[in-house]
Image (cartoon, rainbow, N blue to C red):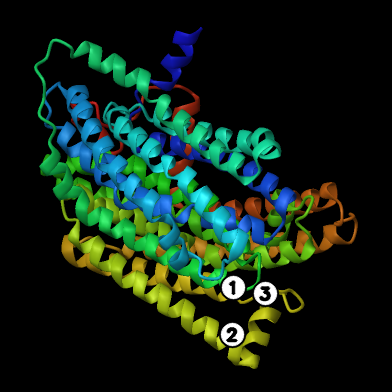
Amino acid sequence: MVRGILAVFTKEIRGMHEAAYLLASFALLSQILGLVRDRLLASTFGISGTLDVYYAAFRIPDFLFTTIASLFSLYAILPALARAAGKEARAVEGVLLWFFAFTSAAAAVAYVATPALTLQLAPGFTGAARVELIALTRILLLQPILLGASNVLASLTQFRSRFALYAVSPLLYNFGIIGGIVLLYPLFGLAGIAWGVVVGASLHALIQVPHFLSERSRQESSPSVRPPLREILTLSLPRTAALGAGQLTLLALVALASTLAPGSISALSFSMNLGSVPLAIIGMSYSVAAFPTLARLIGEGKRENFLLQITVALRHILFWSVPATVLIIVLRAQLVRVVLGAGQFDWDATRLTAAALAVFVLSLCAQSVTYLLARGYYAAGETARPLLIALLSVAVSILSAVGFLQLFLHVAPFRYFVESLLRVSSVESTPILMLVLGYVVGALSNAFATLWFFKRDFSIALSPLWLTFWRGAASSIIGGFAAYLVLAAMGAVVDIDTFAGIFAQGLLGGLAGLLVTVGVLYALASPELRETLDALARRFRDKPQVAVEPSELSSQTTLP
């Protein structure tokens, strides 16, 4: 039985769409668990200063993960494994040892420097809040070590196209955090939740170990392989700097939020967590699924197929993200209330988080496009360009956030317009919306700059994307209007002050909007809709793959 379960998770998967849909399915499950986690946090703490401390404690460990641990990311390791000539597991073993040396040393330095770092991270925290922030941060410094080790091991599972094994790891991570909230918080307070995070990160890494050991045992007789450390660091340094630049934006936003009303960091985190659900399902799934294929096509000199693969992925990202953006904006209050509306999370908290979600989701399409094109650059061995664009977007995000915040605080007509538009006129902590808006402006600038440079650097034709965008926009607006009408009608016949009522209103409104959107896309003969249905049919009917993707042509490797 155990072997059967492992066989399911270690099954090789070929084809970008099939891999993307598998990753999207597991991403959805992981995000559902993440929403359960957030609901438990919201019901226990509401939007409060206590929860602000918990979320702020992640910033230093996350920065460590994206700057030090990501030096050994699978995007840098995969190209090296492609040249390991049957000794991939031995190469990963050597990389893993270097990873532990680098990351453990960095974590030790951060542990000692935590008191000084938290002064800059959260200048608005004083007294007991700052003491607890230091304690939680030090516990969470174990997280980047464990998650980074998991990513090193995952390079081998991705190289072997074992996407299911790669995709199940985040599920275990969220199980650990949920266990910390339910079982450890009553015993140890916030520290118990932090230890739950560590347990989840441990499970994230351990699930990768059996496949690694199995591969290594098959290569036991092979001579030792010198870890391609210089090659990996050369590829990963610019990407790591780009990721670190993104973390700088979050650090700046948290620092600004700590000076605002208590609960501001919580509202910011909840809205971004909710907005990250479609981002993980759409943007991350396609970019992760496409990367191995893009790297192989560039390596084989198939530039036209590389560009075709990018174009196909971009079309499908637009196909999914544009309708998702519109429907989330229309259904934002229902989504937030259903997911988070329990216990200490009251109606004002719902309205504020829903407003922040509506602003944040405006960046869904932009962030998804940036993820994919950045991986296109990495596959081509060009890492400097994404770094320069990321640094630009950081500056734009922070300056925009500071500018919007000052405008909001000192120009009453502007504040009245924003609060009226988002229906939060009588809610406290609304200045946090300006920080989210600054983040969105930075994401949009990043996407447009990346698209412009990618078109110039690779001579890719972007004209097919406009048709996809306008079909998606037209169908989404009509679908969003249908959803709004159903919401209004349901509001008159159900008690929306109850969970059942708000759930029924949101569910029927969402279904109506989705069905109308799909109907309009069908009437417009959307090729993306047809391709999606064909890919799903091949997957669920378990028929032999049809060789329609560039990634499935003349491939003699284990990459999809």
Look at mark 3 in the image and give the residue it sits on. 422
Q: Is residue 325 above or below residue 54?
A: below
First reached walking from the N terminus: tag 3 or tag 1:
3
Mark closer to the observer (2, 3): 2
Type of amino acid under label 1: Leu
Residue 440 location, x and y as percent? Answer: 47, 69
Mark carried by residue 308: none
Which one is earlier in the sequence, the residue at label 2 or at label 1? 2
Please tell me how crowded label 3 is: few (under 14), some (14-19), or many (20+) other residues with Cα within 10 Å: some
Q: How many marks?
A: 3
Mark 2 burial class by Cα count in 10 Å: few <14, some 14-19, many 20+: many
Three-letter amino acid code of the residue under disc 2: Phe
Whether residues under marks 3 and 1 lie with C-beta atoms below 8 angstroms apart, the answer is yes
> Contact (CB < 8 A) between labels 2 and 1?
yes
Give the Cα separation between the discs numbered 2 and 1. 9 Å
Tell which of 382 and 331 is nearer to you: 382
The local secondary structure at tag 3 comes to: loop
From mark 2 to mark 3, how far is it between C-alphas? 14 Å
Q: Is residue 455 left or right of residue 118?
A: left
Identify whether 526 is placed above or below 330.
above
Badge 1 local density, few (<14 within 10 Å), some, or many (20+)? many
**What x and y, as percent, mark residue 377?**
22, 54
Q: Nearer the viewer, residue 200 or 368?
A: 200
* Residue 27, x across and y down, in percent: 50, 40
Question: Residue 408 shows which numbered tag?
Answer: 2
Q: Which residue is mark 1?
A: 433
> Which residue is drawn at the image coordinates 11% and 14% (left, top)?
222
